[in-house]
Image: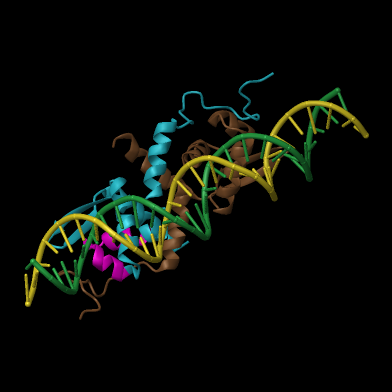
Chain colours: A brown, B cyan, C yellow, D green
Amino acid sequence: MHTSSVCGHSLPESEPLLLDPETAAQMAALFKALSDPTRVRIIAALSEGEWCVYDLAQILEMTHSAISHQLQTLRALRVVRYRKEGRHVFYALDDEHIRDLFQQSLEHARHA
Amino acid sequence: MHTSSVCGHSLPESEPLLLDPETAAQMAALFKALSDPTRVRIIAALSEGEWCVYDLAQILEMTHSAISHQLQTLRALRVVRYRKEGRHVFYALDDEHIRDLFQQSLEHARHA
DNA sequence: CTAATATATGAGTACTTGTTCATATATAGA
DNA sequence: TCTATATATGAACAAGTACTCATATATTAG
């Protein structure tokens, strides 16, 4: 009978160890923004400056619709912000943290 | 007639700007490891030390099967390594970079 | 005004994913 | 050996996702 086996290892009793589900979900949502190749490429482009949907579609060689859908996803995640100028809508990174995560993992990918 | 509009903005010609699809896919795969709340909580626990499947299931209050399936996913992504000891299989973080990404986003989540 | 351009968005669809359930394998203890 | 324990794994299923296509909206040019 044992309700909290530790397989012979000792639990650090004062430590959190278990992330509360809410924080875990929040972190997972952030990483989800970067868990798709198209969004990674969009963020790569936006880390150089702001771009309109039209140019992003050309740069990534994808349809405007596909890009626009992904941008709505990134907007919902508060990763990007936008600015209207005439017929164009310019998108830019809104969250500095995303840029850090992106850069850090880019360096890792490049010599891994 | 224009095949490379820049919406009035100038392209930094010497810059990459566009991430090659292969690198983008590689980065997306890494972030995918952290894009699920269950995996985030597993990684949170493993960042404190190694744990066997049995204990992880108790800590997260989930079935052994669900935990085991996720661990196979993390193994495939080379995020965790394992060590057999008797009936138990102890898992630990294999990739130091994951710990960095995890810690960085945890700090962000905690005062965001 | 009309026509063209830039973007947004809903529906549809193929694909992926996270879990449960049942079952299989492996090790330890009696 | 037989039984209980620890983990792994395949099938099934519901939910989510990334795209295409068609269409809608908004702005500019003529």
Where B51 sits versus A64, above or below? below
Residue B44 % position (x, y)? 32, 61
- Establish if B39 lies above or below A34: below
Residue B105 on the magenta segment: no
**Could you tell me which quadrant the C terminus of chain A lies in?**
top left
Q: Quadrant of residue A99?
A: top left
Percent position (x, y) of residue B34? 38, 53
Residue furthest bottom in the image: A1
Q: Spot the residue most to the top.
A: B1
Q: Position of residue A31 (x, y in %)?
A: 44, 51
- Would residue B85 be found to the left or right of residue B62 on screen? left
Q: Which quadrant is home to the N terminus of chain A?
A: bottom left
Q: Nearer the viewer, residue B89 or A54?
A: B89
Task: Please tell me in which quadrant of the rendered image residue A84 appears.
Answer: top right
Q: Position of residue B80 (x, y in %)?
A: 26, 51
Image point (33%, 56%), residue name: B69
**Residue at the spot 39% in from the left edge and 69% down from the top edge:** A20
Position of residue A94 in the picture relative to residue B99 (left or right):
right
Q: Nearer the viewer, residue B24 or B54?
A: B54
Image: magenta residue range: B40-59
